[in-house]
Image: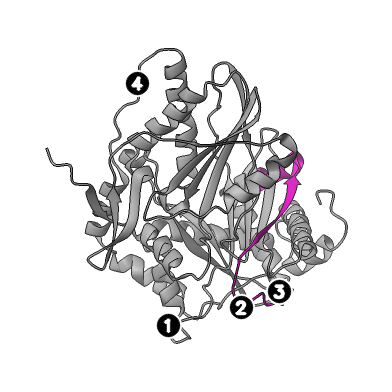
Amino acid sequence: MSTQPLTYPMSRAQEALWLDDLLWDGPSRYLESWACRFTGQLDTGALEWAVGQIISRHEVLRTRLTESGEQPVQIVTAPGPVRMKQLSCPQASLQAQLSRIVTEPIDLDVAPIRPWLIRVSPDEFVLVVQLHHAAIDNWSLNIFQRELMHFYTARVLGRSPSLEPLRMQAGGYAVAQRAAGLDPVDLAYWRERMRHAPRSCTIPPDRSGPEEQAHRAGRHVFTLSPELGQAVRAAGRALRTTPFTVIAGAMAATLWQYGRPDEVIFGTPVSLRGAAADEDMIGYLTDLHPIRLAVSQDTSFRTLVTAAKAEVLGAIAHRAVPYAEIVRMSRQGTEMDAPPPCDVTMAVDDMRWEPFSLPGVTAQTVSMPPGYAKFAVHLSLTARKDRGYTGWWTYDAEVFDATTVAQAASQFTALLTHGVAALDEPLGRISESAAGPSSDR
């Protein structure tokens, strides 16, 4: 039987991140981390074994992204023992240790994953799984949690794992994607949407930043109350759309505040999943797509959300075109080093994450500190059990001051609050109302 490693082309999204890392003069901006704190009698051997089983099961987690014959490829390495990096760290130094880990470089020519186990005390541990974004998306993290729970439980209880074999792996997905090609209708859609599109649209920076861009990330955390969360969902039902689209309207209104342009543009991750075969597969099956909206002081919040809905549906319908190709379209007739159209992005996580627990220990997921900023500004909102949202504005701290982003976050919350309460009010009037105190700041 052949022992040659399996070689596949990269998916389009993988290739874009790989090239960005290759050409970027500095550390990768596309590092992700998942962490969980365990309190109790943790079986560290079983945990290490469980992580190893996940890596063995999902080829993308033991895949090298590299070049062969001047072509970008992914090379699947054989399954083998996984050794977690283990270290001890007192609680007082834990945050500093986590901040160091999130910026630890990952070499895609070696592996896209690195697990760490931090011993805080004899009965308290923190598992940190550091990954490159080319191997994982948000949906994948839910799969990782579920399978970690399954394998660890099977090990400590002496049972055999019972997961069904995966129907597709990342290599097979990339082959199918490349074979399908790009639909001319999809290309024509994005070519038209990018015609005369705004160069970029962001909060005015506080400074230009150093020549060698470190992209050190800052983070502003805020909350949307349960009452505002309910109002957002009610507005979505009234307008026959999703909470994401309502929130996208508030993002457009926020960006419009800065200079009041005729149009605003920002990006959002769009899932490329949809087939039953990729439902349980860990991988990077997401790409960024622009949302371009006309805005004026006479635009009502209803009109803005309705337009955002059409943009989102268009992006989903034509999602096969990679963001890298959309960027090229946006630069036609301009300097090729012009900024990409989406230097502001947003995502809303309304996904119902499966409960995570391990036998004999208390498990609690840990919010990791920011590492490097992928974009100038990124807004992420996650739904809470109380129907509110927890939000993070992650930003390039080399360019923005914390106070600038905090003000933008406050303005966003106020505009969202007034917008969902007065759907037919002109944006100019909503903006004036939002300038006053907001109960959700």
Q: Secondary structure at mark 4?
A: loop
Binning the other alpha carbons within 10 Å of mark 3 as few (below 14), some (14 to 19) or many (20 upward) gives few
Residue where numbered disc 1 is placed:
332
Looking at the picture, which amino acid does disc 2 mark? Glu
Query: What is the spatial separation of the Cα atoms under label 4 and label 2, in whole angstroms?
Result: 53 Å
Give the residue type at disc 1.
Gln
Q: Is residue 436 above or below residue 49?
A: below
Give yes or no for residue 232 being in the magenta stretch.
yes
The residues tagged by marks 4 and 3 sit, at their Cα atoms, a distance apart of: 53 Å
Q: Position of residue 5 (x, y in %)?
A: 22, 47
Q: Residue 13: where, in percent of width, then height?
A: 39, 59
Whether tag 1 and tag 3 are in contact, CB under 8 A, the answer is no
Q: CA distance from mark 1 to mark 2?
A: 25 Å
Residue with the mark numbered 3: 204
Give the farthest residue toward the left: 1
For disc 4, the marked residue is 162
Looking at the image, tell me whether mark 4 or mark 2 is earlier in sequence order: 4
Q: Which amino acid type corresponds to the residue marked 4 in the rendered image?
A: Ser
Q: Which residues are magenta?
A: 208-235
